[in-house]
Image (spheres, rainbow, N blue to C red):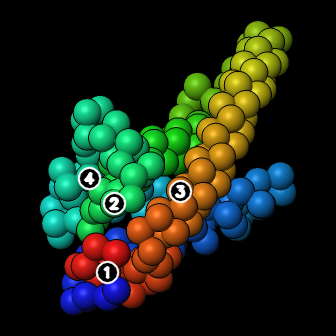
Amino acid sequence: MTGEKVKVWDVGVRIFHWSLVILFFVSYFTGEEENLLHIYAGYGVLGLIAFRIVWGFVGTKHARFSDFIYGTKTIFQYVKSLFTAKPDRYLGHNPLAGWMVIALLICLIGVSWSGLELYAAEGRGPLANQQYSITAPVMANDDKKGHDNDSEDKHENEEAGDLWEDIHETFANLTLLLVFIHIVGALTASTIHRENLIKAMITGYKSTTKH
């Protein structure tokens, strides 16, 4: 049964969604190569996150956080309804999907920030500063002291790099897991509510009629 079509997802949300899919997987599968594609894809992800956070407060109705962040009571009620003949249906994100959006944003922030810190440990990127740089001694009579400082700084940089690399990989893998759960959830909800949620994120439209 079909009903009137209504615009749910604005163009900003749709561009954000599919651009994030592309950039995340590009950055994930180029992570071991440490090339410019990985770095710039990461910057792109960071820019998309910044946009989505802002859009979550000033965007259209169903794009706003206030439209899909629900309390535990509503979440349990929704989960319970999934096992009935007429499960609760939401035009925007359902309670579970809403919190999945938040979880993904948090993990992506973790991936992006740890990536910047890892890049900074190598003396590059916007977070690079003197604590990561290895400077040569200025005075000739301070050569020995300067070399000692260089060795110490290099060791600290390597330790910092190893730490941020572990954090970066952990967040990246956790994000990938959440993406997989998100896909399964979208396909499951599409089956339960008999509507194509993937198509809706492409066209922006959903039916107002409960199936």
Name the amino acid, label 4.
Answer: Phe
Give me the C-alpha separation between circle 3 and circle 2: 18 Å
Q: Which of the two labelled residues, at mark 1 and mark 3, occupies the earlier sequence position?
A: 3
Name the amino acid, label 1.
Answer: Lys
Question: In this view of the protein, can residue 167 be seen by the observer?
Answer: yes
Q: Which residue is mark 1?
A: 206
Give me the C-alpha separation between circle 4 and circle 3: 16 Å
Q: Residues within 10 Å of mark 2 (few under 14, many from 20)?
A: few
Looking at the image, is 207 positioned above or below residue 106? Answer: below
Question: In this view of the protein, can residue 119 be seen by the observer?
Answer: no
* Image quadrant in which you'd find residue 202: bottom left
Q: Are the residues flagged by discs 4 and 3 in contact, CB closer than 8 Å?
A: no
As drawn, the residue found furthest toward the front would be: 85
Name the amino acid, label 3.
Answer: Gly
Q: Are the residues flagged by discs 1 and 2 in contact, CB closer than 8 Å?
A: no
Q: Position of residue 141 (x, y in %)?
A: 76, 13
What secondary structure is marked by label 4?
helix
Q: Which of the two labelled residues, at mark 3 and mark 2, occupies the earlier sequence position?
A: 2
For residue 70, side relative to residue 149 (left or right): left
**Quadrant where the N terminus is found in the figure:** bottom left
Q: Which residue is mark 4?
A: 68
Give residue 86's mark: 2
Give residue 185's mark: 3
